[in-house]
């Protein structure tokens, strides 16, 4: 089974087995190899119950297509990126549905250098080949296994000074996903850090909550647990552990914009004058922090394929998205969930209580967070918003519609997968934020 609808803007994702099954995985593996003609690729898989059989089928398809396949086994998505870069491979496929509920399966596909394959970079061609299923004759490739764990742990730890990390008390919610597998060997090299390990047992049925910390109901646990144990901070991971979400020492959620600003300052302290990329939804805190640290802020479209390509084009040292994707030049321009955790350990060790570090941000920047609204006609509604609010500030169509006024700004973007508009708005005061939020939402929902 292989529904064309499982091919999204950035990856492959659908219900198992009604939208994609092992036969579909075989077809994707073979189509990927026939489209890009890689000599050697890596294949990894997450903890989902369907992932072992889906990965095995994908390996068969890729090998039958003529590629040599290096299996890295159960791993986090960033470990697949690491393997492709470290082993000098021509590409790779991670069998994962990321933060989606347990019923889903999927794949994240990359080329040489861990550069993503998305809707604008070959994924639609892979879709067409896979659905058609008209294969050419090829000599079968070889299949081998590789253990990349030691190299991965050494690489992520190279982003911090382990000796600068003080004895800290941290809570981690692994959501029964890949973080529970990836973090223990890293933590073994940081014995001074005491970690309250929650839901570290890998379980593809996700028995405690969905592995999606973007949803408030899924991060309720980490907020409460951080307060309960008096931790220095808390961390919640998504299913494939390439994103981590932070909670400060008071149990308050930390927006991804503020985390990006903090990490930008850390990275720029080591690389003065570097370029840092952020997405159009972000708080003014991000470009102002980058400039304040002597860096060059570059705004970009949302989405990992666009961010990673821009990082290569600009030679950027770091990038961050509101959605808690954090990218590092020295990690194949790829996103990681482990490196941000380590950076936060180092930051709190050097600067003290996270809530106090965040104080100036919370006093200056007032954010709505993302507000989603179903709409019947996306294009018409964007035009209405432009006509109503465009005269108040500078208009940009880099990604959806952005309006920047003197003391407030917003971005409204269409969803890639459903008739939704996603609003992110910020103002210089709580009162102004609430007033402008209500004004923009009233237009969207009228």
Image (cartoon, helix red, strand yellow):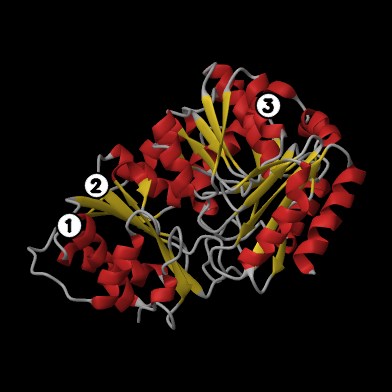
How far apart are the alpha carbons under marks 3 and 2? 37 Å
248 shown above or below 241:
above
Q: Quarter holding the C terminus?
A: bottom right
Q: Position of residue 400 (x, y in %)?
A: 60, 53
Residue 285 pos. (x, y %): 72, 33
- State the image quarter where residue 101 is shown: bottom right
Residue 289: image tag: 3
Query: Which residue is depicted at the point 58% across and 68% down?
Result: 206
Count of numbered badges drawn on the protein: 3
In the depicted view, which residue is nearer to us: 394 or 418? Answer: 394
Disc 1 or 2, which lies upstream in sequence?
Answer: 1
Q: Choose between 31 and 381: the one closer to the eye.
A: 381
Please indicate, yes or no, whether residue 18 appears anywhere in the rendered image: yes
Whether residue 26 appears in this view of the structure is no
- Image x and y of residue 179, in percent: 54, 51
What residue is shown with label 1? 67
Left or right of residue 277: residue 438: right
Do the residues bearing badges 3 and 2 touch, measured as CB atoms within 8 Å? no
Compared to residue 50, the image places residue 333 above or below, namely above
Dot 3 and dot 1 residues touching (CB under 8 Å): no
- Are the residues tagged 1 and 2 within 8 Å (C-beta)? yes
Instruction: Give the labeled residue for mark 2.
Output: 90
Q: How far from the left and from the top, in percent, is residue 147?
A: 31, 46
The N terminus is located in which quarter? bottom left
């Amino acid at each position: 089974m292989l529904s064309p609808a499982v091919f999204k803007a950035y990856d492959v994702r659908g219900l198992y087995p009604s939208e994609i099954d092992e036969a579909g995985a075989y077809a994707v593996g073979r189509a990927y190899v026939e489209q890009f003609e890689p000599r050697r690729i890596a294949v990894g898989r997450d903890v989902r119950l369907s992932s072992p059989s889906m990965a095995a089928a994908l390996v068969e398809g890729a090998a039958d297509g003529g590629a040599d396949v290096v299996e890295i086994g159960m791993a986090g998505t960033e470990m697949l990126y690491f393997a492709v870069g470290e082993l000098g491979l021509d590409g790779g496929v991670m069998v994962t549905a990321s933060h989606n509920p347990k019923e889903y399966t999927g794949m994240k596909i990359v080329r040489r250098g861990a550069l993503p394959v998305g809707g604008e970079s070959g994924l639609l061609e892979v879709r067409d080949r896979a659905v058609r299923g008209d294969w050419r004759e090829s000599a079968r490739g070889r299949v081998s296994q590789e253990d990349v764990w030691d190299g991965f742990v050494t690489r992520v730890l190279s982003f911090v000074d382990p000796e600068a990390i003080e004895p800290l008390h941290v809570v981690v919610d692994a959501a029964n996903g890949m973080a529970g597998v990836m973090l223990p060997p890293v933590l073994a090299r940081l014995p001074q850090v005491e970690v309250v390990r929650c839901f570290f047992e890998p379980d593809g049925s996700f028995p405690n909550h969905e592995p999606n910390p973007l949803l408030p109901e899924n991060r309720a646990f980490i907020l409460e647990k951080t307060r309960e144990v008096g931790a220095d901070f808390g961390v919640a991971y998504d299913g494939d552990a390439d994103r981590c979400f932070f909670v400060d020492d008071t149990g308050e959620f930390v927006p991804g914009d503020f985390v990006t600003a903090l990490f930008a300052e850390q990275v720029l302290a080591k690389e003065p004058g570097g370029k840092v990329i952020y997405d159009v939804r972000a708080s003014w805190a991000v470009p102002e922090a980058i400039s304040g640290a002597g860096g060059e802020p570059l705004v970009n479209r949302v989405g990992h394929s666009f961010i990673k390509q821009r990082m290569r084009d600009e030679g950027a040292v770091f990038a961050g998205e509101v959605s808690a994707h954090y990218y590092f030049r020295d990690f194949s321009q790829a996103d990681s969930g482990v490196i941000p955790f380590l950076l936060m350990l180092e930051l709190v060790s050097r600067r003290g209580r996270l809530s106090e570090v965040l104080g100036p941000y919370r006093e200056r920047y007032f954010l709505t967070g993302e507000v989603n609204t179903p709409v019947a006609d996306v294009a018409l509604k964007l035009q209405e918003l432009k006509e109503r609010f465009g005269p108040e500030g500078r208009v940009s169509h880099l990604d959806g519609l952005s309006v920047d006024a003197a003391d407030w700004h917003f971005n409204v973007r269409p969803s890639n997968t459903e008739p939704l508009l996603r609003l992110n708005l910020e103002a210089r005061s709580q009162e102004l934020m609430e007033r402008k939020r209500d004004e923009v939402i009233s237009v969207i929902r009228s």
